[in-house]
Amino acid sequence: EASLKTVVRKVFEEKDRSKSVMIFGLKEDKSERLQDKVRDVLLTLKLKPKFEACRIGSSSASGSDLAARPVKLCLGSTAAAKEVLSQAKLLKDNEDYSRVYITPDRSIEERNERRRLVLELKKRKEEEPNKQHYIQGGSVHSAEICY
């Protein structure tokens, strides 16, 4: 019975996580209005979904903006989260948000697996710089670069 509860809990967490995204690199200051900052990021993406946002983790006592805490953005639906993720690439072309990244909200296991894949990707890029490398479907792929 304990394993059934664990399975049910994981399913609910996964469903809840599918409606959320994480925002990294959004500058933090002591008197910030987080909802307004997030709204500005979403407007940059030409999106206006209903959302709730909160910083994750404890704030640093020094208040330095060197290590801005990530923002968890909870949206109304999985479709809204997917839309935000699909438009996130537009941030790199924006001067104010070029260092802001939006990723899916992942579980600890998923984050560890993603970290492992990124390390493998970096290793392959060093070993084979003449190929294009990318992560897809839970593994690292390589392809010849066509000019």
Image (spheres, helix red, strand yellow):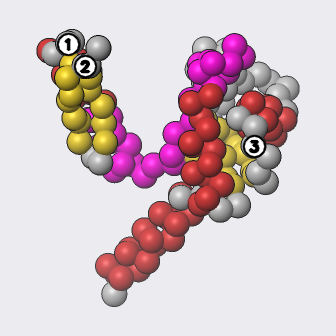
Q: Mark 3 and mark 1 in contact? Answer it, CB < 8 Å.
A: no
Q: Position of residue 40 (x, y in %)?
A: 80, 32
Q: Position of residue 94 (x, y in %)?
A: 68, 19
Tag 2 residue: 145
The residues bearing labels 2 and 3 have C-alpha atoms spaced at a distance of 34 Å
Q: Residues within 10 Å of mark 2 (few under 14, many from 20)?
A: few
Q: Taking 9 as reference, is 62 left or right?
A: right
- What residue is rendered at 63% in x and 44% in y? 84
Residue 62 in view (yes/no): no
Query: Under tag 2, what secondary structure?
Result: loop
Determine which quarter of the picture holds residue 78: bottom right
Which of disc 1 and disc 3 is earlier in sequence?
A: 3
- Numbered label tally: 3
Which of disc 3 and disc 2 is earlier in sequence?
A: 3
Tag 1 residue: 130
Tag 3 residue: 47
Q: Which residues are magenta?
A: 91-117
- Foreground mark, 3 or 1, reads 1
> Which residue is situated farthest in the front direction here?
147
Determine which quarter of the picture holds residue 65: top right
Q: Taking 10 as reference, is 105 left or right?
A: right
Q: Position of residue 54 (x, y in %)?
A: 70, 43
